[in-house]
């Protein structure tokens, strides 16, 4: 693998991860809620769950012009049910 290609892959990998500074102001509350749901048994470790983050219409994150600058509503996580659960 060429040096140029390795550097390009490294840059692409960095772009995939959002740091706390870049993510905006919802990561902290989302992580707290996710940990509380896990501790309370509302979600199960190893199972797929979803968490809805509702941003304001004017949020820079939704417009693609920057990080989150609104005060989004962070909803409780929910387990995604598998067909075999029915």
Image: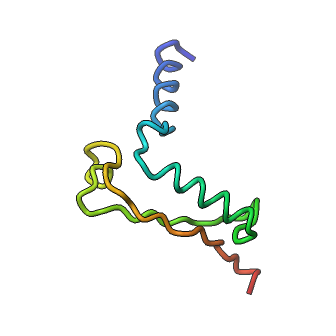
Q: Residue at the top extreme?
A: 3
Furthest-bottom residue in this view: 86
Query: Left or right of 26: which side holds 83?
Result: right
- Residue 19 in percent (x, y) is at 49, 36
* Corner quadrant of residue 30: bottom right
Q: Is residue 74 left or right of residue 60?
A: right
Indicate whether 85 appears above or below 51. Answer: below
Q: Residue at x 65, y 72 (%)?
A: 79
As drawn, is 73 to the left or to the right of 59? Answer: right
Q: Position of residue 21 (x, y in %)?
A: 43, 36
The quadrant the C terminus occupies is bottom right
Q: How is the image coloured?
A: rainbow
Query: With respect to residue 12, does 85 lie above or below?
Result: below
Which residue is pictured at 52% across the width and 32% down the height? 13
> Residue 63, percent across and down?
25, 52
Query: Looking at this view, is 23 or 13 the one in front?
Result: 23
The quadrant in which the N terminus is found is top right
Image quadrant of residue 58? bottom left
Identify which residue is drawn at 32% across, 50% down: 61
In this rendering, the answer to whether 9 lies above or below 71 is above
Give the total of numbered labels: 0
Residue 78: percent from the left, percent from the top?
Answer: 61, 72
Q: Residue at x 75, y 81 (%)?
A: 85
């Amino acid at each position: 693998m060429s040096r140029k290609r390795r550097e390009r892959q490294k840059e692409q990998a960095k772009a995939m991860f959002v740091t706390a500074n870049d993510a905006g102001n919802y990561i902290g509350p989302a992580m707290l809620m996710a940990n509380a749901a896990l501790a309370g048994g509302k979600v199960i470790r190893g199972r797929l769950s979803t968490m809805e983050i509702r941003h304001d219409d004017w949020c820079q994150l939704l417009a693609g012009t920057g990080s989150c600058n609104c005060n989004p509503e962070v909803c409780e996580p929910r387990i995604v049910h598998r067909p075999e659960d029915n």
